[in-house]
Image (cartoon, coloured by chain):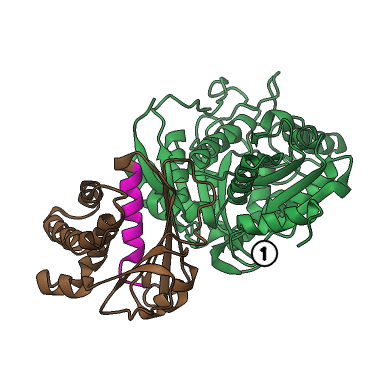
Amino acid sequence: MERMRMVFTGSGGQGVITAAIILAEAAVIHEGLNATQSQAYGAAARGGSTRSDIIISDEEINFPKVIQPNMLVCLTQESYNSFAPIIRPGGLLLTDSRFVKQERKVDAWQVELPMYKAVMDEIGKPIVFNICMLGAVVALTELVQPDSIMAVLKKRIPSGFVEMNQKALDLGITMGAPHKR
Amino acid sequence: MSTQVKFVQGNEACVEAALYAGLDFFAGYPITPSTEIAELLSRRLPMAGGKFIQMEDELASICAIIGASLTGHKVMTATSGPGFSLMQEALGYAIMAEIPCVIVDVQRGGPSTGIPTHGSQGDIMQARWGTHGDHAIIALTASNHQDVFAMTIEAFNMAETYRTPVILLFDEIVGHMREKLVLPEPGEMPLVERLRTSVQGGVNYHPYLPREDGRLPMSDFGGVHRYNVTGLYHDMWGFPSADPGVAHGLIRHLVDKIENRTNQLARYKEYFLEDAEIVMVSYGSAARSALHVVKNRRNRGERLGLLELQTLWPFPRDIVREKCAQAEAVLVVELNMGQVMQEVKKALDHPEKVFLANRIDGVFITPTDIRKILRLIQGKGV
């Protein structure tokens, strides 16, 4: 497989880093791949911009940070403005239509999905916004199986929340699939 | 072979290894970027039958583990630079009184409170000379989680074998990064248990009288023997002594038991050194960037190699000398202003062929940073 270098960005509290961990863990534990996940953070626990780097590969990963991502996810305008310039030309850039207004000048395959709106309309709980985003990522990249994401989630969350997360993941997959290139 | 695969932070790999090694007492004061070690052990250690104490500060933390070790426990504390500074006094006590313990320093930028959430490797010399007086120390490091696990086990084993504190010098990048960790089965990795005296209760026990092989069997403090423990120069009973012969013998013993075993204590990895024209020397997280560059350049036919040090103290000078002997240039890659570079220079006949690729701004050194220095060394300009 081609080495996948991803950067997930957004605002503290959106679950960007959690989503990154879940994806990377699914790749390692359930798909037999190698992955590294790291994050940049400051002293603030909420708010501020957050960034998590994920590398997924079937080979050994030495340098764990991402300089030029093949895939970039931006869940706030601020993070889009900051990070869109670092994407590898032609890379995949996913944003949420409520939070980000995309610009044409970015040399990337830009996908804009109403993930937040769908989560609020269908589930009503913003807490699973990040899982919906993961669903879209999985559909767009086919990096890991949706079942692998669910297997990681089942280990991390109380059983009463599994169904809600499954629904959010499915929503993301449904929205992302038609945009697959 | 084990099939238990985990996806964890480096700090968690350290915790898994400590529990595997039989840790049963941890005292600490949480500090970024080592906090996860205390956090995880506060839950895991009691479940494993051990004791976890959050102390009022780092001075108390190291004193608590020293006391607990003396009573027969396998002990550890974890901190970062500011806390490690506070531990230096009692670290000297543990060296002097020959009490096994493991001290984890997950390095961040310093001096002082520095830059808490960013990586650094600035505590290498602090680990060596932070506490006063002539002494020797063992300090280990690692660049990936499997090696964090292995080196943590080694730290406990060396602490017990040589009755000495062992320092684990990890850093924020490895500590917080997540990657794969394969847990070994119980028994798969050898563990060194405490060497206890065979002297019976009621019979005189000399805590500092070495056996023929030089090792000092211990007696659990508070158990069947009464004996003295002090930070002063002491005789074989552990009582203070100003006798020049005793003083000389003690300091020689404390230094020689480690320095004379420098090669035996050396842990390192080597990549493509056989025909390397340029040898990189690196360790901890920085070695990941160095290895990235070495592999890429090898694919293009450039003769680059990497010597990754895992034992930093006692500094493996013979190994460094041997592995760098044929190199036209040696490039030390580290996240400080050349603390290990100076040691590499001392180890080589031609210190003028040693160069430094570093970062000191809290940003993890990138392959591009290293390549820029390589271009200079290779005479290709900037």
Please name the color used to draw chain B: green
Residue B114, picture quadrant:
bottom right
Of A79 and B164, the residue lying toward us: A79
Of A95 and B54, the residue lying toward us: A95
**Which secondary structure is most common in the magenta stretch?**
helix
Residue A138, picture quadrant:
bottom left
Span colored in magenta: A11-28
> Residue at image x 65%, y 38%?
B98
Residue A39, picture quadrant:
bottom left
Res. B74 in view: yes
> What number of labels is visible?
1
**Residue A14: in magenta span:** yes
Q: Is residue A7 above or below residue B195?
A: below
Q: Is residue A164 left or right of residue B220?
A: left
Residue at disc 1, secondary structure: loop
Q: What subunit carries mark 1? A: B
> Residue at image x 68%, y 36%?
B238
**Residue B38: in magenta span:** no
